[in-house]
Amino acid sequence: MKISPLFIRRATPFLLALGTVGQTPSFAADPIEGFKNTPIIPGTPYHLHDPDRPQPPVVNPSTPFSQATSAPSDATILFDGTNLDRWQARNGGPATWKVTDGYVETAPRGGAIRTKGKWEDFQLHVEWASPSPGKGRGQGRGNSGILINGMYEVQVLDSYQSKTYADGQAASIYGQAPPLVNASRAPGEWQTYDIIFESPRWDETGKQLKKAVITVLHNGVVVHHRYELSGATDGISREVPWRTLSKYTPHDPDVFVGLQDHGNPVRYRNIWIRPIGQYDK
C-alpha cells in the first residue's frame, strides 16, 4: 500500500541533538529530532527544522479558554459536531472522516479535508485533542494541522512534555516560527486555537503588496502576534518541497481552511469562522 509522502516526511526525521531546553518531565532525556543540512531561515541563525533552535518556554494555560464557546452571530458554523456538510476531500469528493459523540476524527490515510467555502481575512476558532494516552515521539505524536488554502500551516501536535524541532511543535507556523511559548495541554484534553488570518495580496502584474499575517492564541495564550509569513509551508504544496525555504505563489485573497491527516487520530470539534471586515463599512 502506498504511504503518503507527507506522512513519511515528518515521521522519520534524523535524531541529531540532545535536548537541554524546555520541558523536563519524562521526555527530558530524549534526543530532539531535526536537521542541520537544511537552509538557514532568513533573519535567524537557525536551519529549517533545526534541533538546536530554542524550545519555547512552557506556560500553564490555566482555566480552559473559549472551549465550547458559541459562535458569534455573523460566523459560519463549519462543524457543530453532527456532520461534515461544509467540508470536502481535497479532490472535491465527500469528506469521509468519522463523526461521533460531537467530534470528528482524522481517518487513517483518509487524506486532508477542506472547507467548501472561502474567506478573505478571517477569525477562526478550532478545538482539537490529541490521542490519549500519548503515543510516539516528536512529529509522530498527535500530528495534524490547520491548513490555510493548502499553503500555510498552523501545526497541531502533542507537545505536552514532548519535544521536536521548535518550528514544528504545537502552534508553530510550521517551518517558519516556533510559538512564543508552549501552552499545550495534556494528551486527550481539549485545546483551542483562535486564529486571525489576513490574506496576502498581489497587484495585477503579480507584484506582492502584502504578506500573509497571522495571530494565534493557543488555549487563550498569545503565541503569535501579527506574524508575517515568509511564504507557503514546506511540504504541503508542490511549490515548496519539504525542507526547502518558504516562498509565495500568487493566489486569490479568498482562501479555504483545511484539516490535515498525518496518520494520527486527532479529534476536532466546535469549528467556526467569521470575516474580519473593515472599518466604516
Image: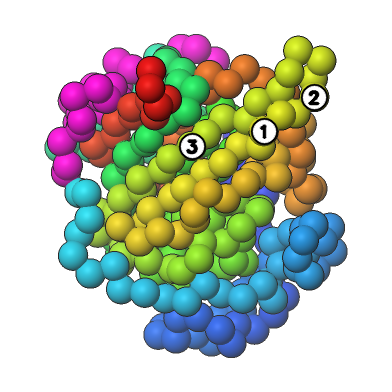
Judge left or right: residue 157 versus residue 86.
right
Point out the tag, 1 or 3, that comes first from the N-terminus: 3
Q: CA distance from mark 1 to mark 2?
A: 9 Å
Q: Is residue 220 visible?
A: yes
- Which amino acid, by three-letter code, is at mark 3? Phe
Between residue 32 and residue 278, name the one nearer to us.
278
Task: Tell me the quarter of the picture where residue 20 sits.
Answer: bottom right
Dot 3 crowding, Cα within 10 Å, few <14, some 14–19, many 20+: many
Q: Are marks 1 and 3 in contact (CB under 8 Å)?
A: no
Name the residue beneath numbered marker 2: 207
Q: Quadrant of the N terminus?
A: top right
Here the colouring is rainbow
Give the residue displayed 77% in from the left and 61% down from the top.
43
- Per the rendered image, the range of residues in magenta is 68-93
Measured as percent of width and height from the top left, residue 174 is found at 60, 51
Judge left or right: residue 167 versus residue 113.
right
Judge left or right: residue 221 versus residue 19.
left
- Which amino acid, by three-letter code, is at mark 1? Lys
Q: Is residue 205 above or below residue 17?
A: above
Judge left or right: residue 176 versus residue 258.
right
Q: Is residue 114 above or below residue 176?
A: above
Q: Quadrant of the C terminus?
A: top left
Give the residue displayed 37% in from the left and 56% down from the top.
218
Q: Main secondary structure of the magenta part?
A: loop
Point out the tag, 3 or 2, that comes first from the N-terminus: 3
Name the residue beneath numbered marker 1: 210
Name the residue beneath numbered marker 3: 197
Between residue 80 and residue 109, name the one nearer to us.
80
